[in-house]
Image (cartoon, helix red, strand yellow):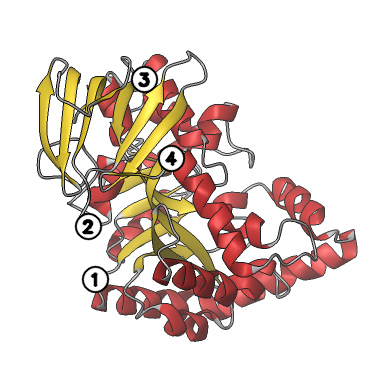
Amino acid sequence: MTEDLILSNARVVTADEIVAGTVRVRDGVIEDVSAGPTAAAGAVDLDGDYLLPGFVELHTDNMEKHFSPRPGVSWPAVPAALAHDAQIAAAGITTVFDALAVGDVHKNSSRVQELSRMADALQQARDAGMLRAEHLLHLRCEVSHANVIEIFEQYVDDAKVRLVSLMDHTPGQRQFTRMEKYKEYYQGKYGFSDEALAQFIEEKLEAQKRYSAPHREILVRESHARGITLASHDDATTEHVEEAVDNGVSVSEFPTTIAAAKKAHGAGLSVLMGAPNLVLGGSHSGNVSAMELAREDVLDILSSDYVPSSMVIGLFRLWREGAKATLPEAVATVSRTPARVAGLDDRGEIAAGKRADLVRVTDRGDAPVVTGVWREGSRII
């Protein structure tokens, strides 16, 4: 049983307003939100800092760099998982969907090689009660990978799998509609010569023709059969979005054009963009700006992607630059909306009856800082 918790003298960001007041927690659940401070014994004085709901992260690759901190280096698995978890919690993320690559564009990808180690390490740490945040699984399925179905079937019945994304990194479309960007990225990543890259591109185009359509059909069918939320990755055209709608997809992850984002949003899909895109002022792949989508009112969810701390910076930037009219609307992009999309109705906002996942943020202008985190009423940071 979690001890009772009282957080007072806070700017409490609820779903609709900012309340200068107090939050009371009992047994890990929010019991009451009230205006004004309290003189109750044991109350924690937040000195006027913001109190936000715990962040819900649907797509992060952050764990990978802890398992492979340098090329050719494989870090011990459980310590790697715990280092990732600590970084996630310190960023205010109390629920994280760790993205595990099911297939990849390169046969020697560390993502493929580390998949089982990452999944097993998370389970070991979870069983031992060592994790600060709650870790769920997001299977990133590369539809053009020859063995994607075989790998997928090894993990899809794990109860922690709550999200499956349909990915296709074939050159010349989606993330890399501009071939010069594709060549720049993959030559930099794998050190291909021009000749080797040309052969690599030819192989990827052939694999897409052979595998993408049948694999997509199986992944969609098996995910729906288990009630797993589906995401479509890097939608670039209205045709991509129409395919996603036909597949029963709920999330459009990282659409690469404003046309695709508008189409997805209008079709009822939640549009997810990376907070690093907001922080850096644009996409590292040369695609659409997250701020542009926010100003067009078609950005629903922020993901930290590869920088956990980007979520708090990104949401405050959305608010301060007027892309979201109120702070509660900006906060919803990292809490209530992703929670609802993932079917986690017990969390995502500060309200009576919701899980007491809470984040204290000290406002330092351009650098809002996470200074306290509670998961189910227990302090983890």
| Residue visible at 86% across and 67% down in the picture | 196
Check disc 4 and report the residue beneath it.
381
Dot 4 or dot 3, earlier in sequence: 3
Task: Determine whether label 1 and label 2 are within 8 Å by CB.
Answer: yes
Q: CA distance from mark 2 to mark 4?
A: 26 Å
Q: Pick whichever, 251 or 62, lies toward us.
A: 62
Q: Quadrant of residue 379?
A: top left
Q: CA distance from mark 3 to mark 1?
A: 34 Å
Amino acid at the residue labelled 3? Trp
Dot 2 or dot 4, earlier in sequence: 2
Is residue 71 found left or right of 22 in the rendered image?
A: right
Dot 3 or dot 2, earlier in sequence: 3
Task: Determine whether label 3 and label 1 are within 8 Å by CB.
Answer: no
Q: CA distance from mark 3 to mark 2?
A: 26 Å
Q: CA distance from mark 4 to mark 1?
A: 33 Å
Task: Determine whether label 4 and label 3 are within 8 Å by CB.
Answer: no
What secondary structure is marked by label 1?
A: loop
| Residue visible at 40% across and 33% down in the picture | 372
What secondary structure is marked by label 4?
A: loop
Check disc 1 and report the residue beneath it.
227
| Residue visible at 70% across and 64% down in the picture | 75
Amino acid at the residue labelled 1? Gly
Q: CA distance from mark 4 to mark 3?
A: 25 Å
Check disc 2 and report the residue beneath it.
343
